[in-house]
Image: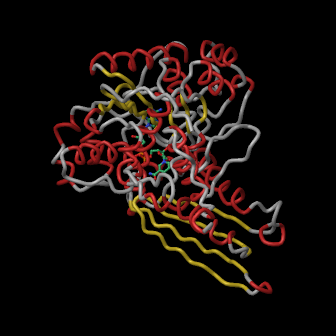
Amino acid sequence: MPKTEIKPAEGKLGILIPGLGAVSTTFMAGVMRIRKGLSKPFGSVSQMQTIRLGRRDEHRTPMVRDFVPLADLLDIEFAAWDIFGDNAYEAARKAGVLDVRDLDDVREDLEKIKPMPAVFDQNFVKNIEGTNIKQGATKWDLAEQVREDIRRFRREHNLARMVTVWCASTEVYIVHKPVHESIESFERGLQENSEWISPSMIYAYASIMEGVPYANGAPHLTTDIPALDALAREKVVAISGKDFKTGQTLMKTMVAPGIKSRMLGVKGWFSTNILGNRDGLVLDDPGSFKSKEISKKSALEYIFQPEMYPDLYKDAYHKVRINYYPPKGDDKEGWDNIDIFGWLGYPMQIKINFLCKDSILAAPVVLDLALFMDLAQRAGMKGVQEWLSFYFKAPMHAPEVYPEHDLFIQHTKLKNTLRHMMGEEPITHLGLEYYKL
Ligand SMILES: NC(=O)c1ccc[n+]([C@@H]2O[C@H](COP(=O)([O-])OP(=O)(O)OC[C@H]3O[C@@H](n4cnc5c(N)ncnc54)[C@H](O)[C@@H]3O)[C@@H](O)[C@H]2O)c1
């Protein structure tokens, strides 16, 4: 199998992050601690996982990070935008995810990260107000300012490459509008201040125009519109999204494929959770919640395929609730009640009570996405990176296919893509070759 031509990961990689909140500061502080040898990158596939190559009796299982040419953690620089002026240390203290002692070990490095003024529009995020915000007569002007921020970051840190990962608040739910349909209509919309162009679309447009890959960690549309998809392909830039797969949805996409693989039926799946961080506050607004609800709900429908298995899943009732409850902070608690049935229709129940830390689950996802998006970019892979579905609740996909939500298929797809890039055979797990003698 021919190896894909991949440019080497030489020089420094800049990671640009809209949103200096719980997830991004936990990610940055983590990378800084890992670089100093103070912590290990638990939860990161790129840093901790091995990859089997060839037959099982060949015993070739390098670390992923030794197999594909990824940026070294020592070569990473960070930049962020936020509507609040707190530096990354102050923002991390306020987010309250990591212990003060863990933050203090890397305090100096965190304090150096001061947020650039944000592109912000209260019509898209209702429940927060800040002062560190860009001013511009048109959305086009704002995009130009973001492009200049990106170029300055490149110059000041002498970066070889960059990648943007959205870690800012979830914007309200909107659907495709005519302004989203083509590059021309989108650019006209920027100039005419179209109300349907959100801040996240402005960051994404600016990134793509600067040749910087863009990953969307929240459920809102951003690059999931024809205009930015076309722009990414035209500019040969990688894009991916949407919504980091963590917490309850991560659990769902682990459990649901198991239930389905054994042809057990589902009568209902009720998910509720409480969380008290700023993300929870933003999601308390019905518009932002709607974006999240749609992203969270779609996973089960695609995994169960009720149209193919009506007896098992046609009437499955699925409800998702998110409740803002400040005392919980970033320690989310989720409950799932799953009513299933088996042989002869006899009912059973599964209860899951997940006490998780959202940002602890999200931080390694940000790291892997940044490194793999940079890899894809160096490999000339343009447009939607479906092989990174593993990391998303609502994976972006080609229009003619449905998204793959099953975590285990996504995992196989991720690893086979890495094998394919490096000229190794994909692994089918057929295994008949061991029994031919
Ligand atoms: N933590 C998880 O497990 C997880 C999972 C999936 C998705 N997400 C998404 O990731 C995002 C970040 O989550 P978080 O817990 O860090 O939230 P957070 O509220 O702690 O941080 C978000 C930050 O974004 C800032 N912000 C809002 N609008 C902005 C804009 N237009 N430009 C720049 N900054 C802006 C806010 O001021 C805030 O500091 C949210 O959209 C969340 O829904 C998180």
Measured as percent of width and height from the top left, residue 60 is found at: 41, 54
Say which quadrant the C terminus sits in.
bottom right
In which image quadrant can residue 314 be found? bottom right
Please tell me how many numbered marks the rendered image carries. Answer: 0
Residue nearest the viewer, comparing 264 with 132: 264
Measured as percent of width and height from the top left, residue 385 is found at: 58, 37
Measured as percent of width and height from the top left, residue 388 is found at: 54, 44
Q: Is residue 172 above or below residue 362?
A: above
Q: Residue at x 37, y 28 (%)?
A: 132
Q: Is residue 168 above or below residue 199?
A: below
Q: How is the image coloured?
A: secondary structure
Q: Quadrant of ligand 1?
A: top left
Say which quadrant the N terminus sits in.
top right
Q: Is residue 132 left or right of residue 235?
A: left
In which image quadrant can residue 165 be found? top left
Q: Is residue 81 above or below residue 236?
A: below
Q: Is residue 431 left or right of residue 28?
A: right
In which image quadrant can residue 161 be found? top left
Q: Residue at x 32, y 54 (%)?
A: 97
Q: Is residue 414 left or right of residue 18?
A: right
Q: Is residue 78 left or right of residue 320?
A: left
Measured as percent of width and height from the top left, residue 258 is found at: 62, 70
Residue nearest the viewer, comparing 297 with 436: 436
Q: Residue at x 52, y 37 (%)?
A: 421
